[in-house]
Image (cartoon, rainbow, N blue to C red):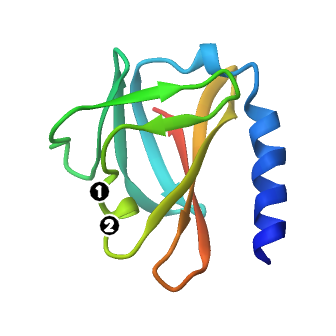
Amino acid sequence: MGRLGVLAALALVGMAGQGLAAQLEDGTYRCTLGMNAHMGDIEISDGAFRGPAYDGDYGEAYPLEVTDAGTINWGGPLGGLSSGGNTVVSTVLKDAGGGRVGFDIMIQLESGNFSTVSCSPE
């Protein structure tokens, strides 16, 4: 997918997140790549996040902002998702089923390819 295609996909996903912004609840979100690869858990509480963590050791809390457009602005690093040459491109809210709201984190890998990590409430 070319850069223009990625931007178009981001715009469509962003529109899908509108209206969900007020519904992102405090709690733990399990993040996966594909169906099975666990990418850590992110804890959200009182406008801050910790993680991702694999072992319950979430580390330092950083602020986050959920926008009216249905996106999340992270105020700190997201562990391996935003290190080692990886860059978080965007995070958009999504319907996680059962009336619950989760989010998708789009990452540009060091190789230049893109990958999406999906996070759903536990």
Task: Please state the horizontal and vertical placement of residue 53, each as a whole percent of the image.
Answer: 26, 49
Q: Amino acid at mark 2?
A: Ser
Q: Is residue 39 above or below residue 59?
A: below
- Drawn side of residue 24 relative to residue 42, left or right: right
- Which residue corresponds to mark 2? 83
- Which residue corresponds to mark 1? 79
Task: Please state the horizontal and vertical placement of residue 25, each as a whole percent of the image.
Answer: 49, 18
- Drawn side of residue 40 relative to residue 111, left or right: left
Q: Amino acid at mark 1?
A: Gly
Q: Nearer the viewer, mark 2 or mark 1?
A: 2
Residue at 75%, 19% (x, y): give it.
19
**Which of the two residues, 71 or 30, is positioned nearer the viewer here?**
71
Task: Please state the horizontal and vertical placement of residue 110, each as a whole percent of the image.
Answer: 45, 80
- Drawn side of residue 74 relative to residue 91, left or right: left
Q: Secondary structure at mark 1?
A: helix
Q: Quadrant of the N terminus?
A: bottom right
**Which of the two residues, 87 or 121, is positioned nearer the viewer here?**
87
Q: Secondary structure at mark 2?
A: loop
- Is the residue marked by circle 2 packed among few (<14), some (14-19), or many (20+) residues within 10 Å? few
Residue at 80%, 47% (x, y): give it.
11
